Amino acid sequence: MTSARDDNAGRAVSGAAACGAPSDPAWSFCHGRRSGARHDHFVFPDGEKTSDSTLLFLSRDAIQAHLLRAGFTDIAILGDWDGSPMTATSPEIIVVAA
């Protein structure tokens, strides 16, 4: 976990990625991914809120099977915004289906 300072509230916040929303001084946001766990840390001028949740990410094969069952035939499952294919270590799951 890395630590970052929230410039808006002046308090330390932590997460796996850099924190903050410089375009909106009303809040900051931290997001960390580890084994499907998500921890959001919001720092508002009048206090803090945290939220924890566990997410289940389907495999490429499972996503494709669900889409085929739903009637989609033209399916692209990408692993990043550069258009690279989805793999087990991809940072994103991007689905384009018609």
Image: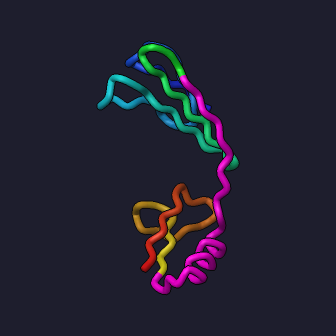
Q: Is residue 40 above or below residue 13?
A: below
Q: Is residue 85 magenta?
A: no
Number of marks in the image?
Answer: 0
Classify residue 26 as left or right of residue 58.
Answer: left
Residue 95 in the image: x percent, y percent? 48, 69
Residue at image position (50%, 82%) is 72
Residue 68 in the image: x percent, y percent? 57, 83
Residue at image position (66%, 73%) is 62
Q: Residue furthest front?
A: 70
Q: As rendered, which of 66 and 87 lies closer to the eye?
A: 66
Residue at image position (47%, 31%) is 29
Q: As rendered, which of 26 and 70 lies closer to the eye?
A: 70
What stretch of residues is rendered in magenta?
Answer: 49-74
Q: Is residue 86 above or below residue 49?
A: below
Q: Is residue 42 above or below residue 60?
A: above
Q: How is the image coloured?
A: rainbow
Q: Is residue 21 above or below residue 66?
A: above
Q: Is residue 54 magenta?
A: yes
Q: Residue furthest left?
A: 23
Residue at image position (58%, 28%) is 50
Classify residue 10 as left or right of residue 32.
Answer: left
Residue 31, picture quadrant: top right
Classify residue 94 as left or right of residue 33.
Answer: left
Residue 1 in the image: x percent, y percent? 62, 32
Residue 38, picture quadrant: top right
Classify residue 20 as left or right of residue 58.
Answer: left
* Quadrant housing the C terminus: bottom left
Residue 35 in the image: x percent, y percent? 70, 48
